Amino acid sequence: MQLLKGEKEEILACVKEVLGENSKTHENLIPILQQVQKKLGYLPALAMDKIAEGLKVPAVDIFSLVTFYNQFRLNPPGKHEIKVCMGTACYMTGGDITLESFERRMGINEGETSLDRHYSLDRVACVGCCTLAPVAVIDDEVEGKVTPTRVDGIMLALEEDREDNAIEKSGPKVGAEDE
């Protein structure tokens, strides 16, 4: 994913800070990765490269470790994080169809973030709301009985919220009269 303006500097400063707080030993690799991810929200390639340099380990070893453990993210989280449950109850009642509906509606695949970083889409094992299956979690809010039609409604609400926020940020129109 392409870095946004100012993000390169933020990544470099974060890695420098975390490496400075930890001894630069191979044993500290996972805690260092966890700290960088906590600060940035994900582990960009640049951060992994700089950590590899700092610890004097091959970058491929760091990438292998990050892709092995599912606690690490390679993509930045979106402003709106959408997680679709794929536990047994959700899967059996159409969780896969729900996931495909979100993918089509957002134009991204599971595990990805939209280019504008407004949405990220992930698959999760179980959210513990089996009686509401299929379930999606939108920004920590559980949505139950999520059919393709519900996906459209959820996305429409998120888009309307996005438009309302854009209007609020731009302020009142020039020349608008009080009513």
Image (cartoon, rainbow, N blue to C red):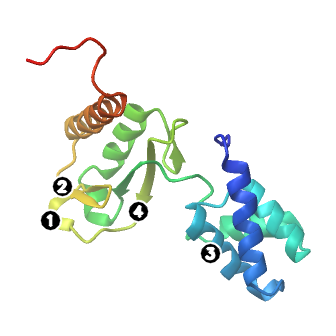
Amino acid type at circle 1 is: Thr
Element marked by disc 4: strand
> Can residue 72 be seen in the rendering of this structure?
no
Please identify the quadrant where the C terminus is shown. Answer: top left
Q: CA distance from mark 3 to mark 2?
A: 32 Å
- Residue name at image x 63 percent, y 75 percent: 35
For label 1, the SS is: helix
- In x, y percent, where is residue 161? 27, 37
> Does label 3 or label 1 sit earlier along the sequence?
3
Kind of residue indicated by mark 2: Gly
Q: Residues within 10 Å of mark 4 (few under 14, many from 20)?
A: some
The answer to whether mark 2 and mark 1 are in CB contact below 8 A is: yes
The disc at residue 34 is 3
Disc 2 target residue: 144
- Residue 1: x, y in percent? 65, 43
On screen, residue 141 above or below 37 = above
At numbered mark 2, what does the secondary structure look like: helix, strand or loop?
A: loop
Disc assigned to residue 131: 1
Q: Nearer the viewer, residue 172 or 29?
A: 172
The x and y percentages for residue 65 are 72, 71
Q: Which is more foreground, mark 3 or mark 2?
A: 3
Circles 3 and 2: CB distance less than 8 Å? no
* Residue in front for this viewpoint, 58 or 127: 58
Write down the quadrant of residue 50 in the picture.
bottom right
Residue at numbered disc 4: 124
Q: Secondary structure at mark 3?
A: helix
* 29 left or right, relative to 59: left
The amino acid at mark 3 is: Gln
Whole-angstrom CA distance, mark 2 to mark 4, is 15 Å
Cβ atoms under marks 4 and 3 closer than 8 Å: no
